[in-house]
């Protein structure tokens, strides 16, 4: 009917021509709407741009990961598989001398050439000679800083060059290569190895762990949803003003369909501009990404290279989505020539189809429940689909929940009443504003649960007793224990030192049938390892607990028999094979939890009871109790360790050690969640400010009445806090459900990690508070009575 | 409109012949209704009789138009009183008001004051009418409204004139 | 300065500049309890600014505003706000009703700002709406009622605290004559019945005719017409 009018006013345009004309007009409105039009287009573009940038970044993540993995595997060196390699002109000795600086890991390698054709590690031009180092740019910077004096003492070599990008896995990685000497005697495949080339010799066909795969898939789903919600919100910035302008267009003769198409054109203009912005943001972000380090991960800009197909998809999907969202949003709006009419009684939001989505999501995930990690073959489409449906479910349930709860709210003070009534009138807007936050949180909670659930598998509880000692230093095979212990005792920040020399006894020189552990240490140290009846230097003990070492118990009853310290196993070079006679008069010791958290069996020997020859076949272990009040005590110890034995391996003890792969995924989730929340916070702020600007006059009138600033500020807070609280409750429910389902899928016992749940909720709440705080200054400014002046 | 007061006012700026007076009057106030010589003659003789003007001199040739008139002190006071007294608000008042404003400008009196006095008088009557309207029946209301709308129109004219006094002064006082 | 005897609100020598624009340049004002005073003048003459100063919404740059023995010009913002809540009422041309509150809640708002309980406030609000003949639209929102009804709701809201001074800035500006007159009748009747003083800013003579006396503001200066006559 009214469509006819439009057709008449523009004589017989073709259908497509009409579309193009209207869309074009919308684009013009978006770009030529004066200052206000520009601001609106800019806001939309920035919003969409941020979303696009995040999408592009996401599409670049797989390539980033694979580049990192390639680099990492290309410089792979020390491993057991090359134990049989003999010295030649092509061989190189490599020692792993990784160290820590405060809480940062430093990758360190000592290199010793055995021939002219020894392989050069990636990123290096020449081998550093003994006393020289080649370092990564980040380490160079660190060493030059005045702060890192202790580290400089530990790494005294002259810096002769920097490691190139191809030898590093991140722009901020701390790494160094040092010239080494006399490494041959220490080859053990674990710390020191002989190699003839760098790179994984037999890259293990590492089938991606299904659980890890599931985690990665969910992380992507969780990150992308809020971006979609955000883009949807961004194309609607300034919607009320636009509606008024469209009404004016109706007045001069546009029909309802034309108006919709013009609006779509406006949205598209914003979205296309957003694509340009997004590309720029991405390129800037890529450079920035090269200069920052988050959760111990840094990258080079060149790593972030989105795959062309995915980038093209983003470029097409975003404008299309912008147009669709606009069309969808204008569904309930009738634009009349004299103004905008929201369909008189907005149709009551129905629950059933909103419930269908999450139920369908659960239905998709259900068949996989209980498949566990062994059979673990997840259909990734079902997983992604199910997770996405559940999360979209949150987004669709939220408006319904906000509306039905808000319509029942009452009572309270003026601020509360103002906020509640406002929400009742436009609960959809409020719900939309927090949807992004809620979805992000539901997803993050589910993931946190999944992580917490599988943590036991990926995070080994080290069991170390951090009460008694806080650090351990493993000395290399040839190092002298006694002088080292003296040095450690003299190190500042060390309270107590327990030292052991450890070795293995066999019943034969070669390929023994039985092996018995031998621990040598002074009485004080031995008392930490077992319950001794009495102890004097010269004593030898056996641990009488048969569960720990049955052989020790048997041998203890056969004094005089000869055992061999450090027996040789076939396939490995000949060991020391030092004979040791079982002494008579051995005392029995009870077992107790030793410093490593386990119980120790075998023979315990005081130094006097052992010959000097035998002592050389043992390996030193030093356990240190630190004085927490001394800053950098750990680094002081590491310095001593490096001084007494360059190949020693100092370790900090923490209650648990995180599996590296798991840690990477968790870091990724955190980075993503923080980025998404920041994005959503920005859009929340924009909507809030726009809403405030629209009410300038009303605010001034309320001030004239003597309304307190506190009252209005509180009402702004409530207005955001109520839907956010609802969103949090709902997302908690969905997140927990999703988490339970995911845990069931991996056949992991369901554990709710309440601390993570609370922290995610706190992050969401923090965003709200931040947004409210940021909107207070403009609110207070608008509350100045000047607003009454404009007439 | 009082022709006598107007002619008196015109004399305030200096003695004039009867002929000059007519010309000045026609030029400033008599756009569509020029004065007859007879009107000038009879008015001037009435003013002369009341002692508001005096004959300043007679040019040879006789006839009233050759007499030069000058205003007396009594005449100035009379003009002053007339200007300061608001007109009874009634329709079609503007020609009188206009004359008063122009005369005030010509004689360097405060024209804005005249307008303000008049608007106060208008509003006073409007208040009375509004009050009567509130207390009266429908017939009273309709009658009062008629008067109120006319008075409002006058009042708007007063406000507009007040806003344009500066421009008017430029035109009138050459 | 000594206020004229019996005066409720007196201002003298008010000066107020907004940036380079001088909105008030030595304006004065005085009103007695129960009196309706119209403030007239062309647009931009400073009449709204005079009202804002008199009502303690904006402090003047200089001059004094005596109300009840206290000088509003030197009062803190918090005290002026409290005074506006307890002693003053306001009606504006538009943009004053909170769109998401129902009419009755809008009227009850000033009472609630003063700490009256919701129930009691709404009962008082309804009584005032009855006096202004709009009690039938109490449950509707401002967007659903006509301009005349909305303005009456606004008047009811201004009077619900039984203020001693009612400030009305072009209260009929957005209404047709019939609605405008009805609103003026109800407003002045209600104000007289509570012997509230009314400061009525208007540029319409027929609205000003509801006043007892008028002052004219031109170029930031005020002129009391009673003294002129």
Image: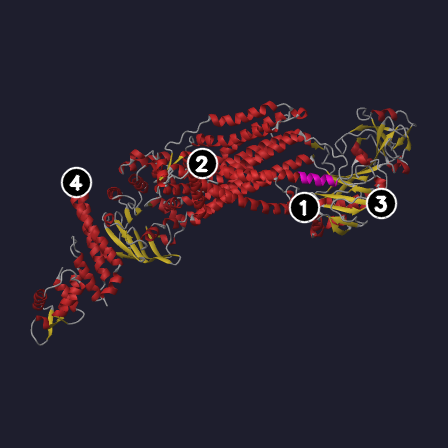
For discs 1 and 2, the disc positioned in front in the rendered view: 2
Which residue, given by chain and number where applicable, does mark 2 sit on?
A327
Question: Do pointers 1 and 2 mark residues of a single chain?
Answer: yes
Residue at the far bottom in the pictured view: B60
Instruction: List x then y, in percent, for residue A418.
Output: 41, 38
Left or right relative to A230: residue A512: right
Where's the C terminus of chain C, which quadrant?
bottom left
Q: Give percent across and percent down for residue A307.
A: 61, 39
* Vertical position of residue C136 compared to residue B29: above or below: above
- Mark in front: 4 vs 2: 2
Q: Is residue A50 visible?
A: yes
Residue corresponding to mark 3: A115
Q: Which residue is mark 1?
A: A172
Q: Is residue A70 on the magenta stretch?
A: yes
In contact (CB < 8 Å): disc 4 and disc 3: no
> Which element is circle 3 on?
loop
Q: Nearer the viewer, mark 4 or mark 3?
A: 3
């Amino acid at each position: 009917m009214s469509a006819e009018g439009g057709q008449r006013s523009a004589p017989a345009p073709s259908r497509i021509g009409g579309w193009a004309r209207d869309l074009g007009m919308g684009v013009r409105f978006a770009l030529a709407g004066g200052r206000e039009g520009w601001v609106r287009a800019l806001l939309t573009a920035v919003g969409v741009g941020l979303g696009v940038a995040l999408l592009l970044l996401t599409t670049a993540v797989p390539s980033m990961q694979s580049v990192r993995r390639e680099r990492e595997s290309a410089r792979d060196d020390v491993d057991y598989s090359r134990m049989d390699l003999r010295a030649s002109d092509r061989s190189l000795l490599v020692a792993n001398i990784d160290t820590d600086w405060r809480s940062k890991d430093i990758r360190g390698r000592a290199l010793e050439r055995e021939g002219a054709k020894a392989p050069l590690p990636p990123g290096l031009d020449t081998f550093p000679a003994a006393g020289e180092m080649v370092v990564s740019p980040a380490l160079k910077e660190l060493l030059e800083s005045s702060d890192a004096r202790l580290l400089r003492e530990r790494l005294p070599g002259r810096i002769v060059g920097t490691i190139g990008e191809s030898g590093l896995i991140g722009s901020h990685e701390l790494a160094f290569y040092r010239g080494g000497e006399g490494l041959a005697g220490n080859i053990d495949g674990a710390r020191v190895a002989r190699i003839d080339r760098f790179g994984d010799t037999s890259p293990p066909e590492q089938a991606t762990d299904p659980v890890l795969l599931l985690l990665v898939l969910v992380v992507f789903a969780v990150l992308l949803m809020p971006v979609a919600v955000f883009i949807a919100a961004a194309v609607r910035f300034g919607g009320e003003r636009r509606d008024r302008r469209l009404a004016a267009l109706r007045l001069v003769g546009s029909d309802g369909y034309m108006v919709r198409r013009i609006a779509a054109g406006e949205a598209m203009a914003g979205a296309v501009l957003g694509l340009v912005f997004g590309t720029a943001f991405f390129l800037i972000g890529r450079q920035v990404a090269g200069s920052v380090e988050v959760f111990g991960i840094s990258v080079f800009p060149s790593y972030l290279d989105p795959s062309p197909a995915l980038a093209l998809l983003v470029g097409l999907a975003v404008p299309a989505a912008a147009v669709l969202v606009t069309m969808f949003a204008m569904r309930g709006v009738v634009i009349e020539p004299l103004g905008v009419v929201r369909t008189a009684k907005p149709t009551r939001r129905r629950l059933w189809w909103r419930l269908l989505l999450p139920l369908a999501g659960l239905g998709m995930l259900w068949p996989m429940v209980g498949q566990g990690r062994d059979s673990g073959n997840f259909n990734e489409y079902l997983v992604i689909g199910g997770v996405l449906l559940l999360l979209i479910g949150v987004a669709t349930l939220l408006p319904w929940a906000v509306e039905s709860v808000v319509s029942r709210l009452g009572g309270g003070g003026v601020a509360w009443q103002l906020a509640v009534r406002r929400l009742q009138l436009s609960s959809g807007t409020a719900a939309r504003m927090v949807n992004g936050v809620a979805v992000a949180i539901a997803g993050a909670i589910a993931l946190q649960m999944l992580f917490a659930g599988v943590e036991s598998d990926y995070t080994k509880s080290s069991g170390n007793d951090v009460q008694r000692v806080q650090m351990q230093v493993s000395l290399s095979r040839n190092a002298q224990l006694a002088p080292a212990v003296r040095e450690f005792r003299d190190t500042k920040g060390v309270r107590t030192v327990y030292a052991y020399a450890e070795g293995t006894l066999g019943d034969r020189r070669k390929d023994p049938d039985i092996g018995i552990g031998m621990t040598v240490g002074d009485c004080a140290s031995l008392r930490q390892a077992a319950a001794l009846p009495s102890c004097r230097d010269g004593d030898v003990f056996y641990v009488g607990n048969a569960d720990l070492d049955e052989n020790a118990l048997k041998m203890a009853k056969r004094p005089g028999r000869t055992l061999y310290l450090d027996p040789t196993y076939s396939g490995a070079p000949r060991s020391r094979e030092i004979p040791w006679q079982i002494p008579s008069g051995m005392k029995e010791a009870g077992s107790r939890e030793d410093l490593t958290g386990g119980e120790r069996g075998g023979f315990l020997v005081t130094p006097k009871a052992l010959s000097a020859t035998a002592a050389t076949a043992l390996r030193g272990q030093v356990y240190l109790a630190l004085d927490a009040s001394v800053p950098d005590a750990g680094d002081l110890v590491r310095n001593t360790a490096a001084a007494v034995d360059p190949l020693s391996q100092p370790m900090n003890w923490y209650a648990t050690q995180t599996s590296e792969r798991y840690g990477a995924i968790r870091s990724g989730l955190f980075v993503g969640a923080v980025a998404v929340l920041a994005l959503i916070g920005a859009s929340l702020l924009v909507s809030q400010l726009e809403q405030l600007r629209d009410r300038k006059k009303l605010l001034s009138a309320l001030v004239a009445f003597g309304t307190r600033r506190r009252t209005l500020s509180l009402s702004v807070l409530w207005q955001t806090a109520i839907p956010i609280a609802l969103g949090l409750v709902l997302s908690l429910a969905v997140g927990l459900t999703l988490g339970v389902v995911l845990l069931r899928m991996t056949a992991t016992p369901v554990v709710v990690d309440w601390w993570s749940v609370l922290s995610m909720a706190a992050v969401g709440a923090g965003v709200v508070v931040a947004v409210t705080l940021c909107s207070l200054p403009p609110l207070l400014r608008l509350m100045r009575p000047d607003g009454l002046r404009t007439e | 409109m009082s022709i006598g007061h107007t002619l008196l006012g015109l004399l305030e700026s200096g003695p004039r012949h009867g002929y000059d007076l007519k010309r000045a009057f026609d030029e400033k106030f008599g756009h569509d209704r020029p004065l007859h010589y007879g009107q000038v003659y009879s008015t001037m003789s009435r003013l002369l009789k009341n002692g508001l003007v005096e004959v300043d001199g007679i040019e040879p040739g006789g006839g009233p138009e050759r007499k030069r008139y000058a205003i007396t002190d009594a005449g100035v006071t009379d003009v002053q009183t007339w200007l300061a007294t608001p007109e009874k608000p009634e329709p079609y008042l503007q020609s009188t008001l206009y004359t008063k404003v122009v005369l005030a400008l010509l004689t360097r009196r405060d024209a804005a004051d005249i307008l303000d006095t008049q608007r106060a008088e208008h509003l006073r009557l409007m208040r009375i009418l509004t009050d009567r309207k509130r207390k009266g029946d429908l017939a009273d209301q309709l009658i009062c409204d008629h008067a109120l709308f006319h008075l409002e129109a006058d009042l708007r004219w007063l406000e507009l004139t007040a806003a344009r006094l500066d421009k008017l002064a430029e035109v009138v006082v050459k | 300065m000594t206020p004229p005897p019996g005066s409720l609100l007196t201002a003298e020598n008010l000066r107020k500049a907004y940036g380079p624009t001088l909105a008030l340049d030595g304006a004065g004002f005085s009103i007695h309890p129960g009196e309706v005073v119209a403030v007239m003048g062309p647009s931009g003459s400073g009449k709204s600014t005079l009202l804002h100063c008199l009502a303690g919404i904006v402090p003047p740059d200089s001059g004094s505003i005596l109300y009840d023995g206290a000088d509003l010009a030197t009062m803190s913002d918090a005290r002026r706000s409290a005074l506006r809540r307890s002693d003053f009422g306001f009606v504006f041309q538009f943009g004053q009703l909170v769109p998401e509150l129902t009419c009755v809640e809008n009227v009850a708002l000033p009472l609630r700002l003063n700490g009256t309980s919701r129930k009691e406030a709404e009962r008082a609000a309804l009584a005032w709406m009855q006096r202004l003949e709009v009690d039938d639209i109490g449950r509707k929102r401002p967007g659903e009622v006509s301009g005349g009804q909305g303005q009456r709701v606004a008047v009811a809201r201004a009077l619900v605290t039984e203020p001693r001074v009612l400030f009305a800035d072009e209260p009929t500006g957005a209404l047709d004559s019939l609605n405008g007159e009805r609103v003026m009748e109800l407003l002045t009747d209600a104000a007289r019945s509570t012997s509230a003083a009314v400061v009525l800013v208007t540029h319409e003579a027929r609205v000003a005719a509801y006043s007892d006396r008028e002052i004219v503001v031109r170029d930031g200066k005020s002129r009391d017409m009673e003294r002129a006559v």
